[in-house]
Image (cartoon, grey):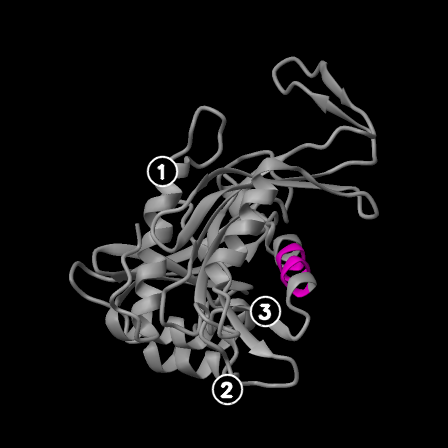
Amino acid sequence: MTNISLSLYTLRLRETHSQEYLPIDNFDEEHDLYQIIGDYMTDRSQNYRNDEDNKHLFRISGLQKPGRSFKGTIETGDYGYETDIVNVDDFTLAYAKQTDDAEMFPFYFYLALPQGANLGILAMQRLGQRGVKTYFSFDLVSYFRHRFSQIMLDIEPLIPAQLIREYLQNGRATKIRFIRFGIHSDISDAVRKNHEPGEGLTEIVIRAKKDRQFPIRGLVEQILAGERDISTLANFRNFEYKTVKVEIEISGVRRTIDLTHPGNLNAELDITNEVKLGDDGLPTFESLDVLAKQYISDALGRVGINNYNVQ
């Protein structure tokens, strides 16, 4: 199954050549970022954004505006090339995509813009390696800059180390997965399958006893600081792992943290096992919405905004 994840970002405003952030609800003593983004969202909901130079189509569907928030689905797709779509049941040609056809992928988003604050928080869904953050950010920043040439809109990933340290401090590390890409020849022979060595992946999974946890906070802190490599977490005979994932239980909910790339820890919060899939094989809007609101409420609380009702 393709991994499904949520990514968190901050939206801040500042004057050009300044690093001091402005209040988002009155950034130039006249305008509110909520209203400006509302204009943008309405326009992109009513009209497709066709980037002819990059052969990219983009729009927002199902837009909702609870409180000072926006949520909905960003539909995006590329065109300009031909490809065959084959039915996997009988391997017949189901459709021949033409150069002027755009295959549109839906991505959930939630943007909270608290009043009296100097930041907003954006949650965006990813589907495996697919996402829409880069294009969405470029489009929104360009729209804003066209209206306010002296004000910068910064969209940045939520601080990774801070988020992970909070999970480690307040949660329990209940499972560690050491992952090796490829199946060792001994294992392939043992299960008598027609696997070639190197196909698939192999995992060593270590689980804590009930109501117990692994005391790994110090080790993970060293990894986040770049003082320790993940290869030194454990030494298994004849098993060289490439990826380490830690499952954290916090407030009754399990979160998976990939320690392989510390610099990317902020971006992808794995929710694959928490969302519900619809008949179309994609995560339902409702299940994504529940999780996104939990993450945004949590993130707002960590930056001292506790009076915002995430709806």
Q: How crowded is mark 1: few (under 14 residues within 10 Å), some or many (20 or more)?
A: few
Mark 3 or 1, closer to the camera: 3
Of labels 1 and 2, earlier in sequence is 2
Residue 235, position in %: x, y? Answer: 46, 72
Residue 74, position in %: x, y? Answer: 56, 43
Judged left or right of residue 137, residue 68 is left
Circle 2 sits on which residue? Answer: 227
Determine whether label 3 and label 1 are within 8 Å by CB: no
Where disc 3 sits, the SS reads: strand
Of labels 3 and 1, earlier in sequence is 3
What's under tag 1, amino acid-wise? Glu
Q: Give the range drawn in magenta.
A: 138-145
What's under tag 2, amino acid-wise? Glu
Query: Residue visible at 36% across and 66% down?
Result: 115
Above or below: residue 13 compared with residue 247: below
Separation of disc 3 and disc 1 at Cα?
A: 29 Å
Marker disc for residue 153: 3
Q: Residues within 10 Å of mark 3 (few under 14, many from 20)?
A: many
Query: Residue visible at 38% across and 52% down?
Result: 292
Above or below: residue 107 compared with residue 69: above
Asked whether residue 194 is drawn in magenta, I would say: no
Judged left or right of residue 147, residue 81 is right
Mark 2 or 3, closer to the camera: 3
Separation of disc 2 and disc 3 at Cα?
A: 34 Å
Residue 153 visible, this angle: yes
Determine whether label 2 and label 3 are within 8 Å by CB: no
Residue 84, position in %: x, y? Answer: 77, 24
Where disc 2 sits, the SS reads: loop
Above or below: residue 16 compared with residue 124: below
Marker disc for residue 286: 1
Residue in front for this viewpoint, 305 or 134:
305
